Amino acid sequence: MTIDLGYWTPVYGGFLRNVGDEEGMDATWATIRDISVTADRLGFHTTLVPELYLNDRKGIDAPSLEAWSLSSAILAVTDRLRVMTAVRPGFHLPAVLAKTVSTLDAIAPGRVALNVVAAWWAEEARQFGGRFTTHDARYVQAEEFVQVLRGLWDKSPFTFAGDYYELEGTIVEPKPSSSPVIFAGGESEAGKESIARFSDAYVMHGGTLDEVRANVADINERSLRIHGREISEIGMPAYVIVRDTEAEAQRELERITTVDPNSPGYASFEEFQRNSKLSLELTKREYSVGTRGLRPNLVGTAEQVAERIHQYADAGISLLLIQSSPLKEELERIAEQVFPLVPQRTAALV
């Protein structure tokens, strides 16, 4: 089996909640531009740009970058990289977002994808005026949001009447060059059933091989029942540590996972657990990097990490979204040492 290798854009100035300024990834355009251009040159397939208006890694007082303006800039300075931008329906008008995506596609045809996120952070919604309803209702809203996007991209004028959105004769021109791939993620029964209805692709948190196999089988069974086909892509984030020896990799793992419950991001971690219906309890060790990125255990020599990636490809993962620190230097190491051992599923976009 083959797999596409991508990465997670560090909009929050790094990935590590227990490590301060030592990451060397300030939340600035200069940092992101350098990473993006490097990743594009190296042949990484996709980057996920998370949408968070507060910083959940370094604490809410720390700077972080806005996803959509950042995505536009990344697309403008790269040639092949696909940019998957997260969108929370409670923070956007769907017709405006449809127009934004069409414009981004005009900048970089065929290189725009979406990750529809039901949202989990009540404090962020309070500060920024986002709509934050019950957990299951947020997925209902997300499903309607996607219906509107696709309708506006498909025809003009477009009229819609739903529980959350109403449009009368709305025109979005130009249309995207192709229908953007829509990813979504969730673990609750209501969330997965909704995602199977409205998304093209699925992105999950990091998991063990057994957890991933079960998750892949579940979402594919739902998609087959609803649409008569399996889901088109399945993505997973993972924190990757590649070193010359396993002992060196384990020392780095120990350094980044020493948990301080008083660290600035710990409160948002606890709120995430309260407002998300997760299929398993997160440990404080997993809090260290978020998105359960350490759970896949991609830690060791290049050969060990490559073998593990092959196992996840066999389990059904088609897109690996790498987190690592410092990201630019680690992407260069991964491209040099791991790429030759892991053939990518599709060529980088042109």
Image (cartoon, rainbow, N blue to C red):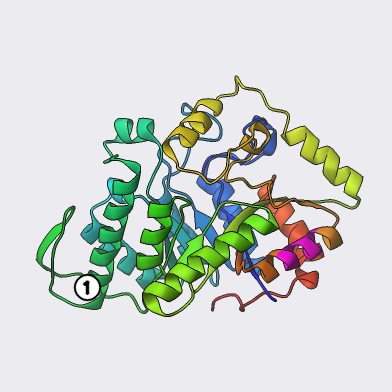
Counting from the top left corner in percent of width and height, residue 11 is at: 51, 45
Disc 1 crowd rating (10 Å Cα; few below 14, some 14-19, many 20+) is some
Name the outermost residue toward the top: 262
Q: Which residue is drawn at 74% across and 66% down?
A: 311
Q: How many labels does the image show?
A: 1
Residue 1 locus on image (x, y percent):
70, 76
User: Along the line of sight, which residue is nearer the eye, 204 or 18?
Assistant: 204
Of the pair 306 and 55, the residue shown nearer to us: 306
Q: Does the magenta stretch include residue 1?
A: no
Q: Give the range drawn in magenta.
A: 305-311
Q: Residue at x 43, y 42 (%)?
A: 52
Q: Is residue 308 magenta?
A: yes
Q: Residue at x 64, y 52 (%)?
A: 207
| The C terminus lies in quadrant | bottom right
Against 324, residue 214 (above or below) is below
Residue 55 visible in the current orientation: no
Left or right: residue 134 compared with residue 275: left
User: Residue 71 occupies which quadrant of the picture?
Assistant: bottom left
Q: Where is residue 29 in the image (x, y as percent from the top left)?
A: 51, 47
Question: Circle 1 sits on which residue?
Answer: 173
